[in-house]
Image: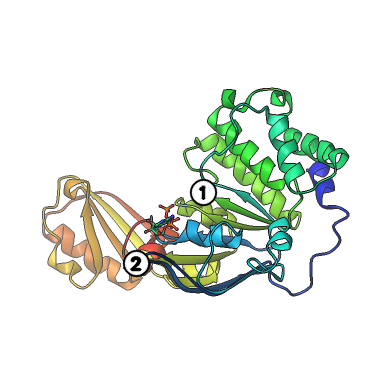
Amino acid sequence: MSALADLWTGLGPGPGDVPAISVRGMRKRYGDLQAVDDVSFDVASGDFFAFLGPNGAGKTTTISAIVGLVRYQEGRIAVLGHDVQRAYRQARLAVGLAPQEFNFDRYLTVEEILRYQAGYFGVAPGVARRRAEALLRQFSLWDKRQRDVSKLSGGMKRRLTLARALIHAPRVLILDEPTAGVDLELRLELWELLRGLNRQGLTILLTTHYLEEAEQLCNRIAIIDQGRLVALDDKASLLARRSQERLELTFQAPVLELPPALAGLDASLELGGLRLVVRHCPAADLPRILRALESQGHHLEDLAVTRCNLQDVFLALTGRPT
Ligand code: ATP
């Protein structure tokens, strides 16, 4: 990471207690559709912040508003204290955006993509060259630097998207589903890179449908549903909201109906009745449930008791899987 760390030297310490991102009462309508409805949250400097929500919840609209790509009708958004509508240039310089869709000019080489982006942000050519080299080496793209972007694999394009977002040495990085469609190995590799960048002081806001990703990487989490924030908390506090256990029972033969012993519990049958999941199961209920199932002739193949994860919290808050 040392070459990459040099990217941020010379920028000086971040601005005191000004939030990296501040969103206050933001509302965005598309025609009759209220896509974002009175959303407020702060991302503190140094945070690794997850912005979660089901499809169409308003995540991309919010991110686009933060980077000045979408004009909102009400509220205020500031990046490092710069209002994104009134001081667009300063606010935009503070943020690097890695969008969900690849939007490279397919006739450019990897190196040209970084050079053009640096030019757009007013980075001097000598500085841009040094940064491009550090980033391409860090993201294992150095030996591909002369290659047309159209010839890169999906995983290489993902890494190039990140490198491009960082070429102007922003203090804040916004990632819209950075590991969508990548294989497990690359996902783990990207997680390591992102953790490293965050450790160097970069503030990161990330949207993802992989709740495990948010659970692994982030320290704060916001959940948006139908344009409204339904949760905003530290990860640990959010997970603690569901302090009970999750019970997963596998049977030797399908169970066709939820047994009466489970009345009043958040339980469902899966895999055609071969698996029973009880969410938020009070630990004290466990022996009673197991006895009742055995006495009704439902013989267990396997039993797993786990702590609630973010997926359970998400389901409880939005009523839908992400
Ligand atoms: P996903 O996880 O599927 O990417 P999202 O949470 O990012 O979803 P948005 O893309 O912000 O959601 O969309 C929020 C709502 O606004 C959706 O109902 C979407 O159809 C609508 N929307 C988004 N962009 C536009 C647009 N340019 N014109 C009209 N409606 C739009």
How was this image coloured? rainbow
Disc 2 target residue? 32
Residue at screen point 71% across, 47% down: 166
Work out whether 195 lies above or below 57.
Answer: above
Asked if residue 130 can be seen in this view, the reply is: yes
Q: Nearer the viewer, residue 82 or 256?
A: 82
In front of the other: 242 or 138: 138
Image position, residue 287 (x, y; %): 27, 66
The 10 Å Cα crowd at callout 1, few under 14, some 14 to 19, many 20 or more, is: some
Could you say where residue 55 lies in the image, as x and y percent from the top left? Answer: 38, 55
Residue ID at (58%, 29%): 106
> Is the CB of mark 1 within 8 Å of ligand 1?
yes
Q: Which quadrant would the C terminus be assigned to in this image?
A: bottom left
Relative height, residue 46 to residue 2 (above, below): below
Q: Residue at x 69, y 24 (%)?
A: 144
At label 2, the amino acid type is Asp
Which element carries disc 1, helix, strand or loop? loop
Amino acid on which the number 1 mark rests in the picture: Glu
Residue 139 visible from this viewpoint: no
* Element on which disc 2 rests: loop
Which residue bears the numbered disc 1? 177
Earlier sequence position, callout 2 versus callout 1: 2
Label 2 or label 1, whichever lies nearer to me, is: 2
Q: Position of residue 30 (x, y in %)?
A: 41, 63
